[in-house]
Amino acid sequence: MSAPIDPTSTSAWAELSAIRDSFSPDLRGWFAADATRVERLSLPLADLHVDLSKNLVTDEIVGALVRLAEQTGVAERYAAMLEGAHINTTEDRAVLHTALRRPEGASPELVVDGQDVDADVQDVLASLSAFADRVRSGDWLGTTGKKVTHVVNIGIGGSDLGPVMVYEALKPYADAGIEARFVSNIDPTDIAQKTADLDPETTLFIVASKTFTTLETLTNARLAREWLWAGLSAAGAMDDDDASRKGAVAHHFVAVSTALDKVEAFGIDPKNAFGFWDWVGGRYSVDSAIGLSLAVVFGPHAFRELLAGFHAVDEHVRTTPLTQNVPVLMGLFNIWYTNFLNAQTHAVLPYAQQLSRFAAYLQQLTMESNGKSVRWDGTPVTTDTGEVFWGEPGTNGQHAFYQLIHQGTRLIPADFIAFVNPAYPLADDGRDVHGLFLANFLAQTKALAFGKTAEEVEAEGTTGALVAARTFGGNRPTTSIFAPSLTPAVLGQLIALYEHITFTQGVIWGINSFDQWGVELGKQLALQIAPALEGDADALAAQDPSTNALLAYYQANRKH
Ligand code: F6P
């Protein structure tokens, strides 16, 4: 794998540095002077309409950013990823989540490391669809012959955040009378609360874990199995012998994993397991069999529409020149803000309650991918990397943290996401509530961009010290992403958009966006510390003074 190109050594970086040194953003002036700004900076991305015009960029800046992408090899690296090169260098793996959404019969066929990737993807999709249809139709029954009413996905990180986000987003499409729940945290509260009102006879657990070694997931899976056995026994629906226990698991547990041997060792029949491959990163896996719960609740057809949405964006990235390439441009703008204008965070603000988990999902996607200090060849990065992504749906955020975005001292680029048509078209006294909602989206992006001058404040009759307090500086950058409706395809497009933004930034920084070594140390230490909580002398002796003091507090206050 070629060495990363140090972005700071490129002529484009020098150009951008020079522009930054005398940069004075002026969105009001830029809009006034240029009647075509909105048109030039509004781009289609499949079903999405992306308005980039309220970003702090000029043609000169966009040109230099595109040259930066060219000089750091963004297009070449994207091509390498698509053809299955091992761009995940630290794990020596291909990175092929884009293959999960290639349509049946795509050409040329994709064979990587001797694996017919297309054939394998279609095989799993077919068995996942068949299984989902069986559960939905009532052909798959619980051990007492009852239809499944609830699926509980047990997984964490990429094996949870994607499914739960999509579930919340597409709930209006649930059409089989099946509800999904998601258990992720090893905090026992999670599984206790999520199963409290469920009937074991009608509950199906999906244990979702790429590695099938994750402490949280396996612990919760064992707790779920105990819950199932205890519930069935209490209802007189299960005998107290191994064969009955095995039979109960066979009817109420399925798994999704790359480690099918470990699935079997857990006691789940491999014929009730759905595979994927090591070239799918956890945070890029919602479109793999990890999305099984979604196929069950929304149907295989909706799941395939979601995949088609992803694929449309993959194709846009592959075939569109960098100057019009939406994910690449958005990634480049993030580089401009992070590395030249010193932004440290990036807000994602959906004007859609259905996207309430979107920011949480993006946090793993972006921060586990690009929160790195070394490059793909092991050398240190040469710039700041990985901004903090965060957000909440509007309008809730308006009444919480928008004050800081409008008038604080920090630059916070923000993406606003909105949909023309609501899932629930309600009226309040004859007035379309969704219209009112959208007015807020438009008002916020307008206020952030253009602000309110002291003269305008004074013209309203305000005087004295209040004038400054009521003045808005504007020039707060936003991107508006608008789509007709939040459909499965549109959601796939949105997710893929952020995958490719993340990829673009990673390439420019020289980062391997597909490993996550930074989560390992904490996992190892938790296993070392766990015995100390039980009073194990060796484990206690191995701790630092602060940890020991916290352990002592725990011992002094524990009630169980
Ligand atoms: O926390 C790190 C991580 O490996 C994530 O990248 C992954 O999505 C999550 O744990 C869950 O892993 P698994 O699917 O193997 O249980």
Image: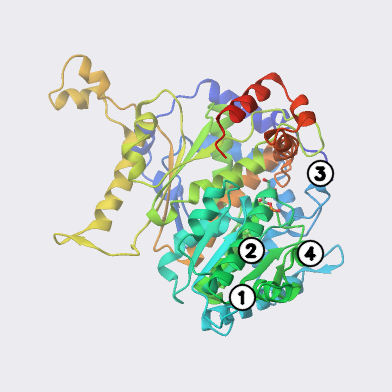
Amino acid marked by disc 1: Met
CA separation in Å, label 1 and label 2:
13 Å
Which circle, 1 or 2, is nearer the viewer?
A: 1
Dot 1: element:
loop
The disc, 3 or 1, on the residue closer to the chain's N-terminal end is: 3
Report the side of 262 relative to 145 (left or right).
right
CA separation in Å, label 1 and label 4:
22 Å
Amino acid marked by disc 4: Ala
Is 189 located above or below residue 124 in the figure?
Answer: above
* Residue at (59% x, 55% y) in the render: 160
On residue 90, the disc is: 3
Q: Residues within 10 Å of mark 4 (few under 14, many from 20)?
A: few
Residue 217 visible in this rendered orientation of the protein: yes
Is 547 located above or below residue 560 in the figure?
Answer: above
Amino acid marked by disc 3: Thr
The disc, 3 or 2, on the residue closer to the chain's N-terminal end is: 3
The disc, 1 or 2, on the residue closer to the chain's N-terminal end is: 2
Which circle, 2 or 4, is nearer the viewer?
A: 2
Which circle, 4 or 3, is nearer the viewer?
A: 4
Which circle, 1 or 4, is nearer the viewer?
A: 1
Q: Is mark 1 within 8 Å of ligand 1?
A: no
Dot 4: element:
helix
The disc, 4 or 3, on the residue closer to the chain's N-terminal end is: 3
